[in-house]
Amino acid sequence: MTELAEMVLLGRLIRAHQKSSIGAAFEADRQKNAGRSPASLRSRSTNSALIWKLCDVMRQKSYAGDGNYPNSYYAASRNTIRTPVRLQGRVETDICVVGAGYSGMATAIHLAEKGYKVVVVEGAQVGWGASGRNGGQIINGLSTSLVTIQRRYGEGAARFIGGLVQEGGKIIRRLVSQYQIECDLNPGNIYAVYTPAHMKELESKQALWRKYGMDDHQLLDREAIRKLVNSNAYCGGMLDTSGGHMHPLNLVLGEARAFEASEAPFMRCHR
């Protein structure tokens, strides 16, 4: 088998492992043949040899490598240097949250606020993944228009989803304010446009969001947007005062600090 073909087959086995419980069968095969050499395995089936290789790779390598943050502006400018606690022995808790990104930390904080005993288990560092590497923007928008959602699923669904979009930003602001999280949170987003046709689209967007309860969009003419962005390139735009921007890694690190302050144990599980 060529190296390329082996890589393709190994990739398929990895995807199969991720999509099902077949990993247990992989491990059983590896243990069964642990005393045999790769040469003897090759005398059996190609799949068996690759399963053996796959199990060793999965057992030895973490998805996050050594768990350190990758080099980035956010990692270099983070305002908290944490020393995670290694998970050891038996730990009893009401709820275990797996993953210390935005979803995991916000969930843990909300549960702790309600009086639950919560443990967070993370395989790398707080905010190691997308939570600590995104653009840091609070944008009130969807990949699909609310018009499309309303047409497909009804008025109630459109109002519900529109409300969720607005609620997300409010949750961030509440946590930042209540727990004094230092993440350089600044209010406002600007949609800048070049042509009158683009302005028509923004006018439609403003009317649409106002219909669903968001009246935070202010249309800007050429002079108004020039004062805000110091450029003559745009014919107009729209200011969303409920949008914003922050340091994404410092936000999730601040959430971790807030969670630890709630006297619920925060733990890191080494791989």
Image: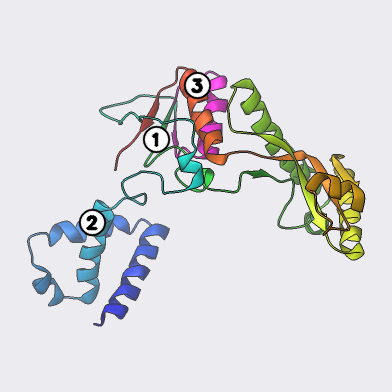
**Residue at 53% across, 44% down:** 131
Residue 46 point in image, percent of width and height:
22, 76
Circle 1 — which element? strand
Looking at the picture, tell me which residue is in the foreground, 196 or 93: 196
Residue 105 point in image, percent of width and height:
51, 33
Residue 216 point in image, percent of width and height:
84, 39
Callout 3: 10 Å neighbours few (<14), some, many (20+)? some
Quadrant (top left, top right, bottom left, bottom right) of the C terminus: top left
According to the picture, the residue beneath numbered tag 3 turns out to be: 116
- Residue 174 falls in which quadrant of the image? top right
According to the picture, the residue beneath numbered tag 1 turns out to be: 121
Circle 3 — which element? loop
Give the answer, above or below, for where 36 lies relative to 146. below
Give the answer, above or below, for where 134 lies relative to 11. above
According to the picture, the residue beneath numbered tag 2 turns out to be: 27
Mark 1 vs 3, N-terminal side: 3
